[in-house]
Image (cartoon, rainbow, N blue to C red):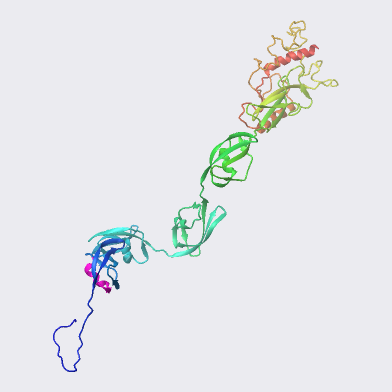
Amino acid sequence: MTVSGDFMAEEGGKLEVSVEKVEKDVIMNIRFMDGDEFIAGGDYFVPEGVNNYSVLEQYVPEGYKMTVSGDFMATEGGKLDVNVEKINKEVIMNIRFMEGDKFIAGGDYFVPEGVNNYSILEQYVPEGYRMTVSGDFFAEEGGKLDVNVEKINKEVIMNIRFMEGDKFIAGGDYFVPEGVQNYSILEQYVPEGYQMTVSGDFMATEGGQLDVPVEKIQKNVIMNIRFMDGDKFVAGGDYFVPEGVNNYSILKPYVPEGYRMTVSGDFMATEGGQLDVPVERIQKKTSLFVTFMTVKGRIVAHDYASVTQAGEPGTCWSFQLGKDYQLPEGYQLVEGLVQKTNIDVPFGCTRGYILFVEKVEDPSDPTDPTDPSDPTDPSDPTDPSDPTDPTDPTDPTDPSDPTDPSDPTDPSDPTDPTDPTDPTDPAEPVDPSKPSDNDNNKTDDTTEVKADVKDDKKDAPKTGDTANAAIPAVGVIGSLAAIAAVLARRFRK
C-alpha cells in the first residue's frame, strides 16, 4: 500500500486502497562512454523491467551528462552502454573573422572552455563566407582568435577544353567559381596522365569558353639503342627516352657525330627495350679547282669538279683528267713536262691545282705562237732576249755540254719538274689578278679569265680544308726554270 492513516468502516461501505508494485532490484553492468572513450562504469542496482534512463542520473560521472533519453530494459546480469559528454564550461573569447588582412566581422563569443574544433564556430561565420581553417583551437576566458575566411563565390558553368597543341584531349562543361580565378582550381579536371602548361589567372563567366594547354606527363625509361651503318655498329648504349610512342627525332642528340639517321616516323619506348637505328655518314662535298697556266704564268682557263660521295676519314677521292675535269679547248699539256693528272683530294676538302698547258701546234698556221721561226711571237722561246735560247752560244744547255738536258734525273738540275719537293718551288700562290712579269702580252681572253676566277672563288664551297679553293700552293716562278730546260730540249730536236 502507498497510503497510510485511518479509514471508516461501515456496513456496505466501499474503499479504494492505493498500492504499487513491489520492485525487485537487479544488478546490471553499465558503462558510461564519451564516443569510443570509456569514462566510468561498473555493476549497478536498477529496478527490474522497463526503466527510464533518468533512473541512471545518480550514477552519471561528475562533470558529464547523458546524451541519451527514453527507456531501457533492466534484467539481472544485463549490460548497458550509456552515451555521455563532458559538461563544458563556456568562456568568452574575442574572435575576428579575417579574409587575408581584411577584417570581415567579429566580436566576443561564448565558446566551450578548453580544446575545441573550429566547426563549433560555424554558427558565428559571417553570411556569404566560409572558414578556410580546420582542426582544433584552445578556448580560454578572455582569449583572442583570428579565423581565416573566404567569400563563397557563385559558381558558373564554363566550357573548358584541354588541348595538347591542336589536339583535343578532354573537355566539357565544368562548374567554376565566378570571376577572376587561378588556373590551379582546374587541377581537379585535368585529364589523367597530363599536366597544365599554363599558370596565372583567367576570368570565369557563365557560358564562357576556355582552352587550357596541357602536355603528357612523360616517364623516362632506359633503352639500349645501337646506331648502325648497314651491318656496321657505329655507336650505342643505354639511353633515357620518354616512355611510350616517340618520334625518332628525339634521338638526334644521341646520333654519333658525322652521321645522320636514315629513318623517320615513330617507335615504341619501353623499359629495358632494344632498338637499332639506321644511320649513314654525312656526305661532305669534295672539290677540286684546276687552273690551266702557260709556262710564262698566264692563266688560260679554270675547271671545277666536285663529288658528294662519303669516304672514311683520312682517305681521298682521285679526280681524273678527261673524266672529272677537261683541258681547255685548243690546249694540251706541255710536252716533255711530267705532270700529275690524277689529283687526290681528302674527302670533305677543297683543293686547288695548277697544270701547265700550251696551244696545240697547227703546222698550217704561219703565226703559230709555238713556231720558232716567228721572231715576233710573244711566246717564242727562241726570243734573243730569252736566256734559255737553245741557239744562244752562251746557252748553258749547249749540246756539247756533257750534262744532257734531256735527262730529267740530272742530279745537277735542281729544277726537276717531277720533284714534288723542289726547293725552288715557292709556297706562295699566284694571284691571277697580277700576271707574271714575263707575260708581256695582255689579251682580252686573259681579262675574261680573271673575271671567271672571281666567280669561281665565290662559288667554291667553304670547307675546313686549308687548301685554297682558287689557286693551289704550287709555285710558278721556280717551275719556269725547269720548263725552260724542257723547252730547250724540244727545240734542239
Taking 460 as reference, is 474 above or below it?
Answer: above
User: Which is nearer the eye, 101 or 174?
Assistant: 174
User: Which is nearer the eye, 179 or 216?
Assistant: 216
Taking 454 as reference, is 168 above or below it?
Answer: below
Total tally of numbered discs in the picture: 0
> Which residue reaches farthest bottom?
11
Looking at the picture, how far across and down is residue 80, in whole percent? Answer: 29, 67
Looking at the picture, how far across and down is residue 246, in whole percent? Answer: 57, 46
Which residue sits at x=39%, y=64%? Answer: 152
> Is 84 placed left or right of 207 in the picture?
left
> Is 119 placed left or right of 485 in the picture?
left
52 magenta-colored = yes
Looking at the picture, how far across and down is residue 437, in whole percent? Answer: 69, 19
> Which residue reaches farthest right?
364
> Is 162 placed left or right of 73 in the picture?
right
Q: Is residue 219 visible in the rendered structure shown here?
A: yes
User: Which is nearer the eye, 333 or 121?
Assistant: 121
User: Which is nearer the eye, 47 or 55?
Assistant: 47
Q: Quadrant of residue 13?
A: bottom left
Q: Quadrant of residue 34?
A: bottom left
Looking at the picture, how far across and down is residue 124, in whole percent? Answer: 31, 66
19 magenta-colored = no
Taking 15 as reference, is 23 above or below it?
Answer: above
Taking 12 as reference, is 314 above or below it?
Answer: above
Q: Is residue 109 visible in the rendered structure shown here?
A: no
Quarter that holds the C terminus:
top right
- What segment carries the magenta color? 47-60
